Amino acid sequence: MAFGFPMDLGFKDRVAIVTGGTRGIGLATARALALEGCHVGVCGRSVDSLRAADAEGLFACQADLNDEHQTTAFVDSVHAKFGRLDILVNNAGGSLGGGGFQVSTLDQWRRVMDINLFSALVASKAAVPHMQQRHWGRIIHISSIWGKEGGGGAAYNAAKAALISLSKAMARDLANDGILVNTVAPGSVLFPGGGWDKRMQADPQGIAAFVERDLPLGRFGRPDEVARTVVFLASEAAGLISGSCIVVDGCQSHSNL
């Protein structure tokens, strides 16, 4: 018996949301999904970045994901625009300064948890009923290798680890609804205006030493390399993958799990 592997990933006319989809990994993911035939809604806070996303054919909405009502309204507006919702990529996040346990403040912890964990929780709560209507859905959370092992700021590590745990709980709860939930954990990714780009401009020698010491491939990752993994997990081809955390880091991390 011959086994074929069709190239069609099943994205035609599907509708996707990418939070924080106007820059970096989020924008690369939105572009990749659109190229596969998805209608894609993105959100952000910068008017200029939203205009740029709109010019690329993305449905761009201004929303502050720290606000529960704005997050829910954004998800519902995408559903109202296209009449369905199939894919949610919870990409919005950030370390907000990083720092260890002793120097981090309670306010920082709350803000880091809000943008990395609770924004994903609220967006997922809003998206799931729309997916249940069709008994099909894909939810992908963008975590970090620092959610799997030590190395980043204390609050950021905790938030990204919680996001991986949330993904596992959601995957089990939503399996009977035909909704698959996974996490992608990128390593250090470089893009214009991002955290690593700013650090490179501030301390090029220090970053060069970091690359030589900590990145086995000798370079940073690119947003499109992470986006390809997200697109696969959102596709028909990933029909048996749920509750997993896929690391995309060029062997940067040290965890065996």
Image (spheres, helix red, strand yellow):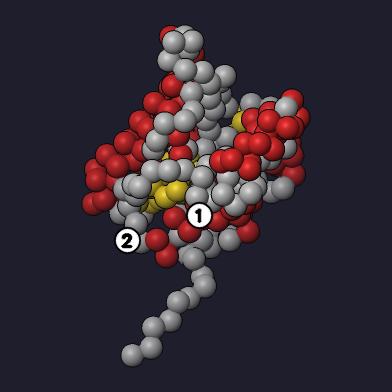
220 vs 122, nearest the viewer:
220
101 vs 96, nearest the viewer:
101
Question: Mark number for residue 169?
Answer: none
Residue 138: give x, y in percent of width and height. Answer: 40, 50
* Residue plotted at (72% across, 27% down): 203
104 vs 69, nearest the viewer:
104
* Residue plotted at (39% across, 38% down): 148
Residue 224 versus residue 21 in the image, above or below: below
- Amino acid type of disc 2? Leu
- Amino acid type of disc 1? Thr
Packing grade of label 2 (10 A; few <14, some 14-19, many >=20) is few
User: Which one is earlier in the sequence, the residue at label 2 or at label 1?
Assistant: 1
Secondary element at image label 1: helix
58 vs 138, nearest the viewer:
138
* Residue plotted at (50% across, 50% down): 251
Q: How many marks?
A: 2
Quadrant containing the N terminus in the rendered view: bottom left
Residue 83 versus residue 5 in the image, above or below: above
Q: Which residue is mark 1?
A: 229
Residue 23: give x, y in percent of width and height. Answer: 65, 38
Give the quadrant of residue 36: bottom right
Query: Is residue 150 something one can see in this rendering?
Result: yes
Q: Nearer the viewer, mark 2 or mark 1?
A: 1
Query: Is residue 139 something one can see in this rendering?
Result: no
Q: Are marks 2 and 1 in contact (CB under 8 Å)?
A: no
Secondary element at image label 2: loop
Q: Which residue is mark 2?
A: 240
